[in-house]
Amino acid sequence: MTQFDFIFMLTRNDRTVADAAIHAATALKAGIRHIGFKDIGLPFEELADLARQIREGGGSTYLEVVSLDRDSEIRSVKAAVELGVDYLLGGTHAEDVLPLLHGTAIRYYPFPGHIHGHPSILGGTQAEIVASAVALARHPGVAGLDLLAYRAAGDVPALIDAVCRAVSKPVIVAGSVYRPDQIDIIRRSGAAGFTIGTSALDGKFPATGTGLEAQLRAITACLEALPQ
């Protein structure tokens, strides 16, 4: 990742979409180089093809874990290792995951806070989420954090700011980002990047059109317009 990145997620409702390969091709053609998917929604063989497609297109691969129980998360992490993704996002069992990633080049960004439900919701107070973030960031094998800020109750800008100030490792803001002002808030808080999936695939981001190409152009334009 660079200073501030947009990660395009090939997902809807926390599942990889059936036509992910088509959308990945559109994104790569549009110059998007950070592309991710979830560990559910497609068979492993299709996820492997998708990861290969992104790599061959010059992109970095992100797999976000949405499994909430330990055993399912372990299976997802093992799949990420077999897929050889560049980044593993999410998950809530860092103590169990870190040994599985030892010796790999995968950069691990777990979820701070209490995660529940599908689509995933971030629970807990701001203080509890920050404390969780600090504890996770202490692990040498944790490269950064995957913060579901816009799926939390309370003052979201204050939460992002507090987490980014509390840890020295990069923070990605994931989930329910669909407006330019949110991107501006995330950037000003010092986060390293953000994910957008459903809102772009469903044509919800403010743009000249609802098609994916227009959506990605609009998101990219937001990044280019932000103060550096």
Image (spheres, rainbow, N blue to C red):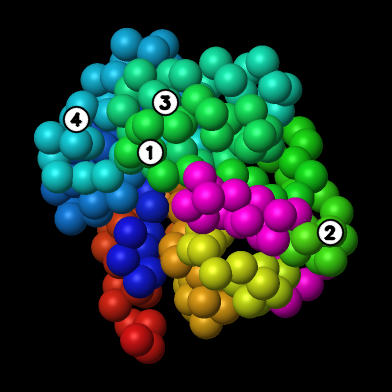
Q: Which residue is mark 3?
A: 80
Of 112 and 25, the residue lying toward us:
112
Q: Earlier in the sequence, mark 3 or mark 2?
A: 3
Residue most extreme to the bottom: 227
Measuring from the top left, give residue 150's x and y in whole percent: 67, 59
Q: Amino acid at mark 1?
A: Ile
Crowdedness of circle 3 by 10 Å Cα count: few (<14), some, many (20+)?
many
- Distance from label 3 to label 2 (Cα)? 29 Å
Kindly state the secondary structure of the residue where label 3 is placed.
helix
The verdict on residue 85 being magenta is no
**Where's the C terminus, which quadrant?**
bottom left
Q: Amino acid at mark 4?
A: Gln
Mark carried by residue 53: 4
- Distance from label 4 to label 3 (Cα)? 15 Å
Measuring from the top left, give residue 129's x and y in whole percent: 77, 58
Determine whether 36 is above or below 226 in the image. Answer: above
Q: Amino acid at mark 2?
A: Glu
- Distance from label 2 to label 4 (Cα)? 39 Å
Task: Please state if 92 lies on the left or on the right of 123 as rendered.
Answer: left
Query: The magenta stretch spans which residues?
Result: 132-158
**Where's the N terminus, which quadrant?**
bottom left
User: Which residue is rendered at x = 64% and y = 46% of the image?
Assistant: 111
In this rendering, the label closer to the viewer, 2 or 1: 1
Task: Please state if 225 lies on the left or on the right of 95 as rendered.
Answer: left
